[in-house]
Image (cartoon, rainbow, N blue to C red):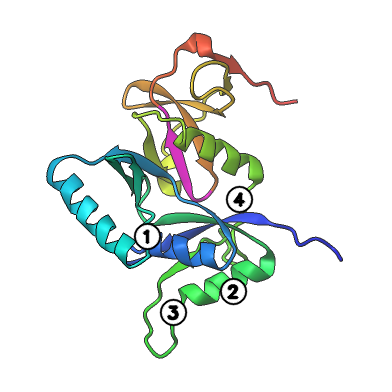
Amino acid sequence: MEEVRQNWYALKVFYNKVFEMEDRLAAMGYETYLACEKVQLKGEEHIDAARKLSRLSQEHREDKRFICQGPVIFERRPMVSSLLFVRSGKDGIQQISEMLKGPADLNKPEGFVYRTSDWQDFSVIPDRQMTLFILVTNSGDSGLRFFSADDISHFTSGDKVRVTEGPLKGAEGYVKRIKKHRRLLVSIEGIVAVATSYIPPQFLEKIVDK
């Protein structure tokens, strides 16, 4: 039996329900990725979260927005509002697209799958682009900035480089000047780009395309 080709796709999820959609897709057996920062809760936020998690525990339920490490509670907060990635075969992404349309009688879509510029097909994200995006958004860099596909066109092309040291080691992208600061820009074409904080020049090596 021929193995079904799996690709990464991007979803736009409406109504601040990206965590619910993450859970739903996971229950359906799909691999997902949601770029989140992990924020430690303190004061009233910590108390409110602790109460909520206690109630959910009694009901044998969980909320994946929160991460407990002993008495410390962290909250996962999306870095890019409503943007969720899913890995699927061609039939699967069609099923997901139909699900996002919501019940026909309600005419209330829950989101959509990003499409190619000609709108003829769903936009497939190359594995390499997705790997680099995950590497950068999981790096712990507190200076990340995100840009839409339209924003990216405003920056002139720079040198293609690879990071050789530090938490971003292995990341590849283009050196861009953004608000007078030189940053590494890693993009998922047609969807989103992330710019790192400043990286010392000695940690960068130029990539020469063959």
Position of the N terminus, as image quadrant, is bottom right
The residue that label 4 is drawn on is: 125
Q: Where is residue 93 in the image (x, y as percent from the top left)?
A: 60, 67
Q: Find out whether residue 8 is within the magenta segment.
A: no
Judging depth in this view, the residue of 193 and 61 nearest the camera is 61
Q: Which residue is drawn at 46% across and 55% down?
A: 84
Judging depth in this view, the residue of 149 and 78 nearest the camera is 78
Q: Which of marks 4 and 1 is nearer the N terminus?
A: 1
Type of residue at label 2?
Gln
Q: Which of marks 3 and 4 is nearer the N terminus?
A: 3
Q: Which of marks 1 and 2 is nearer the N terminus?
A: 1
Q: Which of marks 4 and 2 is nearer the N terminus?
A: 2
The residue that label 2 is drawn on is: 95
Q: Position of residue 142 (x, y in %)?
A: 34, 29
Estimate how packed mark 1 is, as few (under 14), some (14 to 19) or many (20 or more) residues with alpha carbons within 10 Å. Answer: some
**Alpha carbon distance from label 2 to label 3:** 12 Å
**Alpha carbon distance from label 3 to label 4:** 24 Å
**Alpha carbon distance from label 1 to label 2:** 26 Å
Judging depth in this view, the residue of 91 and 23 nearest the camera is 23
The residue that label 3 is drawn on is: 102
Q: Earlier in the sequence, mark 1 or mark 3?
A: 1
Region in magenta = 190-196
Residue 62 disc label:
1
Type of residue at label 3?
Gly
Q: Can residue 153 be seen in this view?
A: no
Type of residue at label 4?
Ile
Q: In which quarter of the image is residue 151?
A: top left
Q: Find out whether residue 193 is within the magenta segment.
A: yes
